[in-house]
Amino acid sequence: MTLRLIMCLLSMVPLFSFGQQWSLEDCIKYAQEHNLALKMSEQNIRLSETNEMTAWAGLLPSLNAQAGHGYNWGQRIDPFTNQFASSRIQTNNFGISSSLTLFGGLQQYNSWRQAQVNTLISEKDFEKAQNDMALNLASAYLNILLNKEFMEIAQRTLEATTAQANRIAKLYEAGQLAQGNLNDIQAQQAADQANYVAAQNNFTLAKLNLMQLLQLDLHNADSFDIVYPQIDINTEITIPDSPSTIVSSAVQHFPEIKSAQLKVASAELGKKIALGSYSPTINASFSYGTGYSGAAMIATGPGTPVSYPIGTVAGSGDMVWSIPQMVYGYEVKPFKDQLNDNINKQLFFTLNIPLFNGLNARAANKRAEINAINAELQLQQTKQNLEQAIYKAYADAVAALSTYQSSLISVQASQKSYDWVKARYEQGSATAVEYNDALIRLQNAEATLSRSKYEYIFKLKMLEFYEGKSIRLN
């Protein structure tokens, strides 16, 4: 749609040469590639896509691995031997765990759907930013063309006044006219010179405005210029009978309408997400782990029988010994064996029923309902704004065309009046005031004609743009 506006203005423009002149199409293509606001808007799409991927991943089980290595001092119960240990002990643990929400009020699913809609919203917002930039560039481009015509009108006026001033000066020197006649025409020449300088300044400012929209280096303003096509209005071109048909077309395809509609859909999903906070949740979790402890010992060697004294015989005093017991040497159980022997697995199902959580769920639902109402109101307001813009463009186009047609007659009449007064002035039968009045009327009529021409062109192309048509200048 943006490129339709690009082609709208100046399809007859010659091919762009970067060392010479910029066409409107060149301006818009350059802005699409370099404008910072458009780049930021495009990055919002990337951000929304990332959020969408994150929301989708939220539907998948989580999977985490962990490992630990540490030392313990002091009295404690070893978790692997279940015995008291007081010496320094090295411990290691390794595990992997996973959890999955089996049911959570469909909050995660609706969050994913909402993220998908938000990505589409970002895309439509980017399209709108492109359209706005194209419209602004088209307006600035036509403003340069308009100010160029104003400058040419002022130049022609100055040339005509200068020619008269030169003629009057010669007549004055010949003694045929009084000093007052020369003073009057020279004063008018100075005023026309000032108007010409002002027109040149306005023309330069119009070009600077376009450069600022393009975010070009203003230090190169002297070398910046545009293509100046010959634009003629075909007065037989008819404006659509009613703006209502244009509104119906624009509502169907304009990105700001699509964006507002998608925001309504996103807000409705937000209501479902908030409603899910009232629902019980069922979670499943599984863990698999093992570990190592420096306190885990195993016997080594064949063992040695050892007896311990347990008392004496009364009267004789002979020592009484216990039954021999096998005493073994001990060493820490190997790391690999402990990892195999200490494996543990856990599977849990958890049901969580929300009963009271500080009215958080109620507040979330209330906010979601308000957001949905605001989204719907925003949609209606966006439609109204678009409708108002179309009706205004329609009325402006009708008025501009009427003004243009009237201005054509006015220019013709003013030209005839000026030619007649000029001839009388040169013959000495008209005063300088009459001559200046006729010249000013002609200048004003030409300026009104130029202004109404470009106003009509821009508004007509806007209407075609709203209709979704390919806009061209013939």
Image (spheres, rainbow, N blue to C red):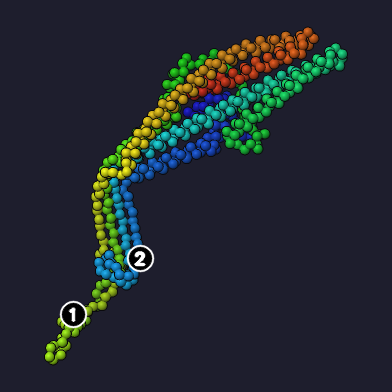
Q: In the image shown, does 207 or 72 lie closer to the viewer?
A: 72
Quarter occupied by residue 454: top right
Is residue 266 shown left or right of residue 351? right
Q: Which residue is mark 1?
A: 325
- Above or below, comparing residue 457 to residue 42 in the picture: above
- Tell me what residue is drawn at x 30 percent, y 38 percent: 275
x, y (%) of residue 467?
Answer: 46, 22
**Residue 6 screen position, x and y as percent:** 53, 28
Say which element carries label 2: strand
Type of amino acid at the residue the image marks with label 1: Gln
Q: Quadrant of the C terminus?
A: top right
Disc 1 on helix, strand or loop? strand
171 versus 93 height, above or below:
above
Q: Is residue 310 above or below residue 415?
A: below
Q: Seen from this angle, which residue lies furthest bottom?
A: 316
Tally the marks.
2
Amino acid type of the residue tagged 2 in the rendering:
Gly
Q: Earlier in the sequence, mark 1 or mark 2?
A: 2
Task: Tell me the distance, in whole angstroms, between the alpha carbons under discs 1 and 2.
Answer: 36 Å
The numbered disc on residue 70 is 2
